[in-house]
């Protein structure tokens, strides 16, 4: 029986994945580096610096560590200016309904995100209070597909691995959940990963799954 659900944030609970795309695109355009949605999909679940290194694979020149710091900062400043404009209205009704119902059913809920901005996003969208545990990018050393972020959430929730379900929009996130010994439900881009235990057409599908035996 599933007793705990561990949610990725960007692209699962809120559409901040699009803001990440816009911010990286602004940087890539400034530097004259090719960047598109396909490359963007490789950044899902990947830390800020590791994402920059993926983008720089297409660069025609090399960059020093301090130039990379400046670029990551430039991207983040613009990204944060976009998320600061978010309000509770930016949470899809199906997401709110799902979280409310899972909470009423007594499931333990966590957010496990690679983002250092996760607490700010949860605050501006009014979602913070749904979660018993919030693990963000400042609390981990290794990015997905390393299972660190999910294992920390599972530990802090005091849930058994076999009773926890991870929800992810990143293929590397599905891999991370499995490496951590937990089941994974895929949504959006991650549904192309055939390894996922469940495929969600929207977050509301969790309401059926969470009542089932895994
Ligand atoms: C993940 C996103 O949630 O957080 C990645 O999927 C992002 O795209 C990563 O790079 C780090 O985010 P931030 O906000 O710390 O730059
Ligand atoms: Mg994500």
Image (cartoon, rainbow, N blue to C red):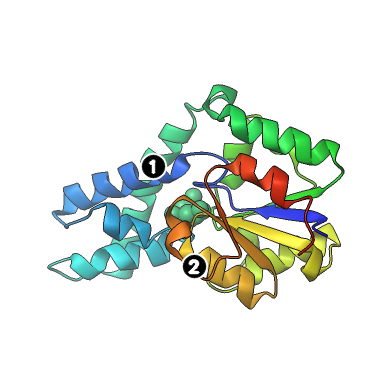
Left or right of 28, for residue 204: right
Task: Please identify the quadrant where the N terminus is shown.
Answer: bottom right
Is 196 left, or right, of 22 in this rendering?
A: right
Residue 81 in the image: above or below residue 109:
above
**99 or 112: nearer the viewer:** 99
Q: Position of residue 196 (x, y in %)?
A: 56, 65
Give the residue at x 50% y 54%.
169
Assign a secondary structure to mark 1.
Answer: helix
Please report contact status of discs 1 and 2: CB closer than 8 Å, yes or no.
no
Which circle marks residue 128 in the picture?
none
Please say whether residue 17 is visible from this viewpoint: yes
Position of 182 relative to 120 (above/below): below
Q: Where is residue 62 in the image (x, y as percent from the top left)?
A: 19, 71
Q: What percent of the width, then of the height, locates residue 33?
A: 17, 57
Q: Which residue is drawn at 55% across and 22% down?
A: 89
Please give the label number shown on residue 172.
2
Where does the C terminus fall, quadrant-wise?
bottom right
- The residue shown at (65%, 61%) is 139
Drawn side of residue 75 relative to residue 131, left or right: left
Dot 2 surroundings within 10 Å: few (below 14), some, or many (20 or more)?
many
Q: Does the residue labelled 2 lie within 8 Å of ligand 1?
A: no
Q: Name the residue under label 1.
A: 18
Residue drawn where x is 42% and y is 33% of the image: 81
């Amino acid at each position: 029986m599933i007793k705990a659900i561990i949610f990725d944030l960007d692209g699962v609970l809120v559409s901040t994945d699009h803001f990440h795309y816009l911010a990286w695109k602004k940087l890539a355009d400034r530097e004259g580096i090719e960047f598109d949605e396909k490359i963007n999909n490789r950044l899902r679940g990947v830390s800020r610096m590791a994402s920059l290194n993926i983008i720089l694979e297409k660069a025609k020149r090399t960059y020093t560590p301090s130039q990379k710091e400046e670029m990551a900062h430039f991207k983040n400043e613009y990204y944060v200016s976009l998320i600061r404009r978010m309000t509770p209205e930016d949470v899809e009704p199906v997401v709110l309904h799902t979280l409310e119902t899972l909470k009423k059913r007594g499931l333990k809920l966590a957010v496990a995100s690679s983002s250092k901005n996760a607490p700010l996003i949860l605050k501006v969208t009014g979602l913070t209070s749904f979660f018993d545990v919030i693990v963000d990018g400042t609390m981990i050393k290794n990015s997905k597909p390393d299972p660190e972020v999910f294992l920390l959430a599972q530990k802090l929730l005091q849930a058994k691995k076999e009773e926890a379900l991870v929800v992810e929009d990143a293929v590397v996130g599905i891999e991370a959940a499995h490496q951590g010994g937990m089941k994974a439900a895929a949504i959006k881009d991650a549904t192309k990963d055939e390894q996922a235990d469940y495929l969600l057409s929207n977050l509301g599908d969790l309401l059926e799954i969470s009542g089932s035996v895994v």
